[in-house]
Image: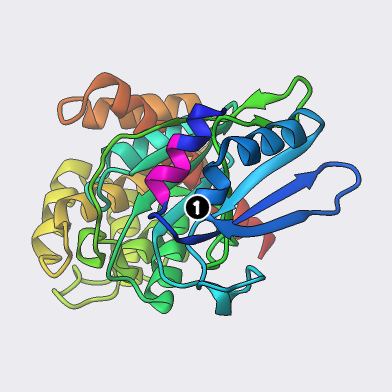
Amino acid sequence: MNLVAHQFLNRCFAPEETIALLLRRESPTVPTQRVVTLETALAPRYQAWLSYENGTGANVYAAANPLRPGSRKRTKECIASVRHLYLDIDEDGDARLAALRASQLVPPPTSILSTSPGKYQVLWRVEGFDFAGQERTLKLLAIAFGGDPACTDCNRVLRVPGFLNRKYDPSYRVTVEYPDDSIWTPDDFELDTDAVDAMHFVSISTPRKPPLKHSHSESDWAWVSHELAHGKDAVKLTRELASLRLDKPNPLYYSQRTVDIASARLWLIEGIAIDDVITMLESRRCAELSAALCSARAREIAATAQRMIAHRKTV
């Protein structure tokens, strides 16, 4: 029996719940889907069949949310309730995961799957989310932490740890860690839309006065970018922005990230090498974070600024 997969499914679902399993081969790419009860999926004979299919080339996935009893498909209409929030991290995985762990805007994940080198799937066990709230939060998570923005459907499937990822040669065994056993609610996720917008807004408007308490994040970004370009001290600017944005769930985090991304973008535009940008970001926050988290955060912010510049050139 695959004990890792058995434990994972047991933690994700309740007894007698209906779940969906998906087997997909790289060639031919015809998927095989099974809708079964949790007890059926955990039975030794069924686990042996999954292991056989995986051993002969099939990737093994499970739907992140339980299905309605009696369902035969994995459509959105068949999803019974929101059980998990999830995030696919496929690029700059180690840096982005470190930034997520250090963030004060989201609670600790329930599960972190390593699906291949540097790629992760992050899950939070939740309650109190409706489908619209789940989709909105998934989009905010993807924007904030550089995940796949397309992975926001309630019928999304995720890899099952303990099985091999057969997309690679040699195959990669999917592993899992469980940072926290809590069940989180919408109030535990402080990713308001304005905070996320500020991370990715790239237009710089004309100079203006400092933003008022209820200004939009686009105005914050324009003002911060202008002040930095004219030599204002970043630490003082961070404190000033935080004091002006007390409407935010976490004003200091919001202001630090806004100022640091704007700084990194400005330095890159000026032709400073990205490694030097990372070093300058580390120096700015080294007194506030551990060395490992500070380094990972700096790399993630520099990469975010680099993507913003590249996006600007293509629009």
* Horizontal side, residue 39 vs residue 163: left or right: left
Q: Is residue 307 magenta?
A: no
- Residue 288, x across and y down, in percent: 16, 31
Viewer-proximal residue, 44 or 266? 44
The number of callouts visible is 1
Q: Residues within 10 Å of mark 1 (few under 14, many from 20)?
A: many
Q: Residue at x 64, y 41 (%)?
A: 46
Q: In the image, what residue occupies the spot 59% across and 26% down?
A: 117
As for residue 11 lying within the magenta part, the answer is: yes
- Placement of 300 over or under 65, stated as above or below: above
Residue drawn at x 58%, y 51% as measured from the top left: 62
**Residue 45 horizontal/vertical position (percent):** 64, 37
Q: Amino acid at mark 1?
A: Leu
Q: Position of residue 291 (x, y in %)?
A: 27, 20
Numbered disc 1: secondary structure: helix
Specify the quadrant that holds the C terminus: bottom right
Give the labeled residue for mark 1: 38
Q: Is residue 285 left or right of residue 38?
A: left
Q: Nearer the viewer, residue 181 or 308?
A: 181
Query: Residue placed farthest to the right in the image?
Result: 28
Q: Position of residue 142 (x, y in %)?
A: 47, 56
**What's the magenta bit mostly, secondary-structure-wise?**
helix
Quadrant housing the N terminus: top right
Q: Is residue 96 visible?
A: no
Name the colour scheme: rainbow
Q: Name the quadrant containing residue 85.
A: bottom left
| Residue located 57% across and 66% down the image | 155
Who is closer to the viewer here, 314 or 53?
53
Q: Is residue 288 left or right of residue 22?
A: left
Q: Is residue 145 visible?
A: yes
Which contiguous range is marked in magenta?
A: 7-12
Q: Is residue 99 above or below residue 216?
A: above
